[in-house]
């Protein structure tokens, strides 16, 4: 039986896991640079975190693969890892929604999902109303709601990446929650958006795509209001 990790090792593993939780799927190289760890050191800690069920190694998302050669694997947080970081999921909510669906029909689950999305939209409108960059403002708002969101610039648009989902277990059972949430994002940004991936469906990050044409149109309207 192996000895438990020393205090420094625990703190380092905690820092690695938190870095992935906050920044999303990451390669060993990116983690080493972010945390100033040697390649050998980061590999050792990653192997231990995988063995403990906290992390999982996966092939990178197509949008993250750049350059020639075989892309490096990325490390993502598992459900078990998320639970260890005090983001507990409400099993009672799943049971309650299943009961509602079985007894009264799926329309009640859809109504619940819309009510939750309406609440997100109501709170989000306040956060976005005076923001010069609505995409960045939405990401900041989502981070404040526990989603650890960032914005990534793409050639044909932008992506809002949510690196954590407080309701992932519930949404895995009831995708209506994700669909309603996406509709709320569309309403807040004033345009059609596309959900490319979700943690609830096994992806390492929830990704919402915003077309480039929409961003340019907003810039044109903003400049017109300013008289430019």
Image: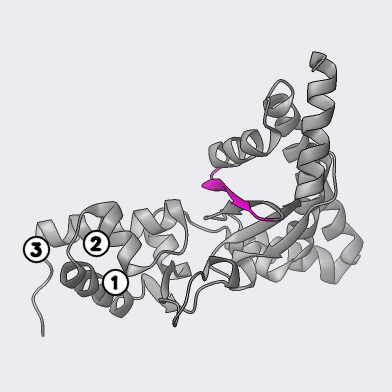
Which mark is drawn over residue 96? Answer: none
Report the residue at 48% width, 71% height from top. 67
- The mark tally for this picture is 3
Instruction: Mark 2 and mark 3 in contact? Answer it, CB < 8 Å.
Output: no
**Residue occupying image coordinates x 64% and y 65%:** 198
Task: Name the residue tied to disc 3.
Answer: 6
- Residue extending farthest to the top is 227
Is 52 part of what is drawn in magenta? no
As for residue 149 lying within the magenta part, the answer is yes
Seen in the picture, residue 84 relative to 190 is either above or below; the reply is: below
Q: Give above or below for 60 relative to 124.
A: below
Q: CA distance from mark 2 to mark 3?
A: 11 Å
On the image, numbered disc 2 is attached to which residue?
13
Q: Position of residue 121 (x, y in %)?
A: 77, 37
Judged left or right of residue 118, residue 126 is left
The part of the chain drawn in magenta is 146-155
* Lower position in the chain sequence, tag 2 or tag 1: 2
Q: Gap in Å between the C-alphas at discs 2 and 1?
A: 7 Å
Whichever of callouts 1 and 3 sits on the residue coming sooner in the sequence is 3
Q: Nearer the viewer, residue 219 or 75?
A: 219
- In the rendered image, the quadrant that contains the C terminus is top right
Q: Is residue 27 left or right of residue 91?
A: left
Q: Nearer the viewer, residue 146 or 173?
A: 146
* Residue beneath the point at 80% across and 34% down: 218
How many residues crowd around disc 1 within 10 Å: few (fewer than 14), some, or many (20 or more)? many
Mark 3 residue crowding within 10 angstroms, few (<14) / some (14–19) / many (20+): few
Q: Nearer the viewer, residue 169 or 42?
A: 42
């Amino acid at each position: 039986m192996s000895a438990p990790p020393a205090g420094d090792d625990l703190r380092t593993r905690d820092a690695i896991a938190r870095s992935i939780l906050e920044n999303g799927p990451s390669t060993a190289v990116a983690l080493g640079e972010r945390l100033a760890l040697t390649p050998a050191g980061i590999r050792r800690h990653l192997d231990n975190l995988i063995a403990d069920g906290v992390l999982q190694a996966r092939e990178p998302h197509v949008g993250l693969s750049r350059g020639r050669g075989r892309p490096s694997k990325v490390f993502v947080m598992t459900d078990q890892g998320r639970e260890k970081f005090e983001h507990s999921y409400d099993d009672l909510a799943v049971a309650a929604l299943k009961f509602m669906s079985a007894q009264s029909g799926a329309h009640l689950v859809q109504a619940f999902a819309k009510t939750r999305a309406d609440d997100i939209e109501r709170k989000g409108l306040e956060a976005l109303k005076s923001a010069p960059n609505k995409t960045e403002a939405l990401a900041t708002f989502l981070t404040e709601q526990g989603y650890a969101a960032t914005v990534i610039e793409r050639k044909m648009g932008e992506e809002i990446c949510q690196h954590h989902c407080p309701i992932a277990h519930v949404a895995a059972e009831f995708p209506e929650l994700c669909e309603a949430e996406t509709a709320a994002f569309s309403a807040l940004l004033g345009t059609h958006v596309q959900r490319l991936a979700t943690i609830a469906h096994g992806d390492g990050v929830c990704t919402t795509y915003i077309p480039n044409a929409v961003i340019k149109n907003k810039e044109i309207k903003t400049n017109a209001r300013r008289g430019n």
